[in-house]
Each structure stands twice: as C-alpha cells, then as structure tokens.
C-alpha cells in the first residue's frame, strides 16, 4: 500500500470486512491468551483492544504485526 499521496479509500468495504473478520478471530484468541497468562480473559481483551487502537492511531509499517498475543506475553 502506498501512502505517499495520502490514503486511498477505493477498497474501504474490503477493509471494513477484513477488520471485522480479524476482530472475530482476535478477540477469542485474546481471551484465551489472557487466561493462559493468568490475568484473566478481560485483561487479554483490554490488551488486544488497546494494542490495536494504538497501532491504528500511530500508524505502523507493512512488517508490523500487532495482535492479541503481543500484550499477553509480558508475564
């Protein structure tokens, strides 16, 4: 994706569907990682939501992967 001339909204429908699909997969995984790390499912969900929010807010790189397992491994 090339953002030199600004973002392009040609594929906004696909981006929304892709985001919803990722959320459906990521939230149960986040809950499982929270339970596995011993802090509980709610903490895993908060970690995933905040990580996704800050990754979207501050941008990233094409190689950046921010998912539900990132904040759950800081034990």
Image (cartoon, helix red, strand yellow):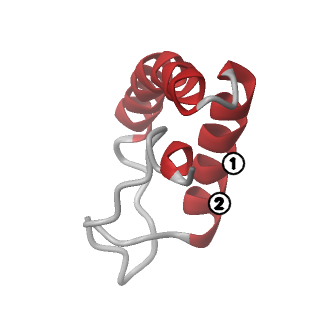
SS label for mark 2: helix
Which quadrant is home to the N terminus? bottom left
Does residue 52 appear left or right of residue 6 in this picture?
A: right
Q: CA distance from mark 1 to mark 2?
A: 6 Å
In the rendered view, tell whether residue 20 sits above or below residue 61: above
Does residue 20 appear left or right of residue 53 in this picture?
A: left
**At x 69% / y 48%, what residue is drawn?**
50
**Which numbered marker is on residue 54?**
2
Does residue 56 appear left or right of residue 68 in this picture?
A: right
Q: Residues within 10 Å of mark 1 (few under 14, many from 20)?
A: few
**Which numbered marker is on residue 39?**
none
Residue 8 pos. (x, y %): 40, 60
State the residue in front, 48 or 32.
32
Q: Residues within 10 Å of mark 2 (few under 14, many from 20)?
A: few
In the rendered view, tell whether residue 53 sits above or below residue 62: above
**Where is residue 74, by image quadrant?**
bottom right
Residue 55 pos. (x, y %): 55, 60
State the residue in front, 75 or 68.
75
- Tell me if label 1 and label 2 are in contact, CB under 8 Å: yes
The residue pinned by badge 1 equals 50
SS label for mark 1: helix
Residue 30 pos. (x, y %): 53, 28
Residue 53 pos. (x, y %): 65, 51
**At x 37% / y 30%, what residue is drawn?**
18
In the rendered view, tell whether residue 72 sits above or below residue 54: above
**Where is residue 29, by image quadrant?**
top left
**At x 35% / y 31%, what residue is drawn?**
14
**At x 44% / y 66%, what residue is drawn?**
7
């Amino acid at each position: 994706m090339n953002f030199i001339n600004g973002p392009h909204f040609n594929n906004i429908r696909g981006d929304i569907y892709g985001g919803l699909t990722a959320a459906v997969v990521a939230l149960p995984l986040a809950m499982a990682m929270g339970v596995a790390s011993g802090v509980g499912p709610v903490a895993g969900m908060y970690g995933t939501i905040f990580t996704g929010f800050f990754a979207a807010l501050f941008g990233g790189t094409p190689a950046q992967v921010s998912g539900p397992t990132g904040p759950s491994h800081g034990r």
